[in-house]
Amino acid sequence: QLKLVESGGGSVQAGGSLRLSCVAAEGPGTRVCMAWFRQVPGKEREAVAAIYVRSGNPYYTNSTKDRFIISHDRTDGTVYLQMNRLTTEDSAMYYCAAGAPNAAAWTRASEYLYWGQGTQVTVSP
């Protein structure tokens, strides 16, 4: 079973940057698409960005498209999320996910089979 391990979370002031990493370790698994989601207590898990591994095509939401960059290192399979101009609204637990959604469904958490344990991002005013 595919195991995903996130790192890079932490605390930062508004306007700052963080880079999250997701390493896929152990076993095969569907990773046609690698994505980042985030969740705050009491709310549903929200899509942040995704990348289709073969094509390298990235996808973003309206709230992240001008500030975040998702990338995939083909040499070792690591997926990165560079987050710039962070705001307090970006504070959340960030999760890495792997699956095979079609492009129209990349934001749906139910389309992803594998999930990491999450890494906390806290943005202070």
Image (spheres, rainbow, N blue to C red):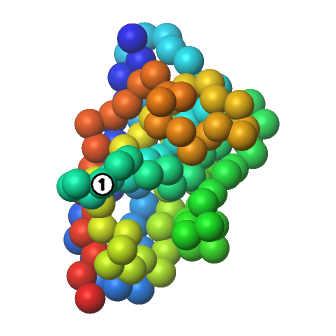
Q: Is residue 20 above or below residue 102?
A: below
Query: Residue at 22% across / 54% down in the picture?
Result: 42
Query: Residue at 46% across / 22% down in the picture?
Result: 113
- In this view, the residue in front, 92 or 23, is 92
From the viewer's perspective, tell me whether residue 54 is left or right of residue 42: right
Could you tell me residue 49's position as x and y percent?
56, 52
Could you tell me residue 43's position as x and y percent?
30, 54
Name the quadrant containing residue 103. top right
Query: Residue at 43% across / 61% down in the picture?
Result: 19
Q: Secondary structure at mark 1?
A: loop
Name the quadrant containing residue 101. top right
Query: Residue at 41% across / 18% down in the picture?
Result: 2
Q: Is residue 39 above or below residue 18?
A: above
From the viewer's perspective, tell me whether residue 62 is left or right of residue 13: right
Could you tell me residue 98's position as x and y percent?
50, 29
Can you say which quadrant of the picture contains the C terminus? bottom left
| Residue type, label 1 | Lys
Could you tell me residue 12's position as x and y percent?
28, 76
- In this view, the residue in front, 29 or 44, is 44
Name the quadrant containing residue 18. bottom left
Label 1, on which residue?
43
